[in-house]
Image (cartoon, grey):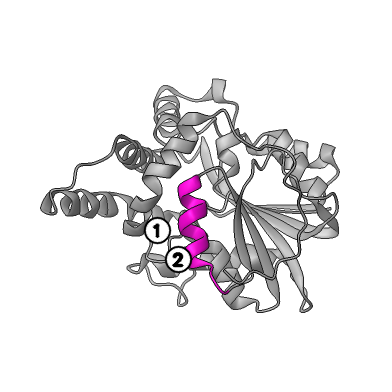
Amino acid sequence: MNITIPLLYTTTRSQKSNKENLIDFYNEATEDYEFWSHDFNMHFGYYTPLKTNLFKRDTMLNEMNHQVFKRLHLKKQKSIIADLGCGIGGTMRYGLAKYPKLSIIGITLSSFQIREGNKRLQNTNGLIIEENYCQTSFKTNSLNGAYAIESLCHSGHSKQALQEAYRIIKSGSKFVIADAFLKKNPKQLCLGSNYCYNQLCKGWSLQGLGSIDRVKNDLQQIGFKNITIQDISFRVAPSVLHVPFAILNFIIKKITTNTPLKPNSWKNLKGSLFALLSGIHIRSFGYYLITAEK
């Protein structure tokens, strides 16, 4: 592998997570995402009329990538950023293709994602490493930006994860989050919303979703400035509506090839279904794009 990324991290501390269920989930279920996205985008999409195609899911998923990179305000000179919870590197490959002078280091806890993702990043300025995004070994003020697409939910959008993002990026750099959040305190959820929320967390091994107001306050307390929060739920909805069809096609494929479904594949399918059902409760859940500057 030809990697030209500058060494910005040390290898002296172990970043092994004790969240065995999360690691197992991604080690087993990641390969299933090819049924969701040929580009291995492990997230929902962003619909833009006349630009994306409602019937071609990857056009919307890649548009979400575009929206995230646009908000990073990357300069034309060489720069290096972090993907905090990179999956198998789908978003990284999009960014590296669009910005030739960009280098990206992806962070994941999954050995499967590291192995398979780095195969797809050969001969690029991209590299996936085993790190916990709540406590990385990047040097302070070392990166030109960072982003997290549907990954911080695995920590419950914890303040620790937000603080770490603030620590590792340079002054004036951007941190962008694309994710689902609660619009209210979990204790205020109605019976239906609460059931969908619990099943979503179980299916996708989520610690929980942070409330958007709490996350905004955390960002402010940490020191981020020029915080912009956009509710893009209706932009995301068209890709979410693909979920039942993707699930049906996935199951039919497994049946016709006589391939048994792994336990974590069932969990993944269940989580995907309850993501759709949660989206119906628009007073409780929303999908947001957050941009914050250090």
**Number of other residues with Cα within 10 Å of mark 2, as a class: few under 14, some 14 to 19, many 20 or more:** many
The residue under the point 74% across, 65% down is 80
Local SS, label 1: helix
Nearer to the camera, 193 or 118: 118
Q: Which residue is mark 1?
A: 238
First of labels 2, 1 by sequence position: 2
Nearer to the camera, 48 or 65: 65
Quadrant where the image shows the N terminus = bottom right
Local SS, label 2: helix
Q: Which residue is mark 2?
A: 60
Residue 279 visible: no
Disc on res. 290: none
The residue under the point 70% across, 77% down is 101
Residue 113 sits inside the magenta stretch: yes
- Residue 249 in the image: x percent, y percent? 22, 55
Report the amino acid beneath label 2. Answer: Met
The picture quadrant where one finds residue 188 is top right
Find the distance from the CA under tag 2 to the CA under tag 1. Answer: 9 Å
- Residue 175 in the image: x percent, y percent? 73, 54
**Residue range highlighted in magenta:** 111-123
Tell me if 82 is positioned left or right of 257 in this view.
Answer: right
The picture quadrant where one finds residue 261 is top left
- Residue 216 in the image: x percent, y percent? 73, 41
The residue under the point 48% across, 41% down is 282
The answer to whether mark 2 and mark 1 are in CB contact below 8 A is: yes
Nearer to the camera, 28 or 179: 28
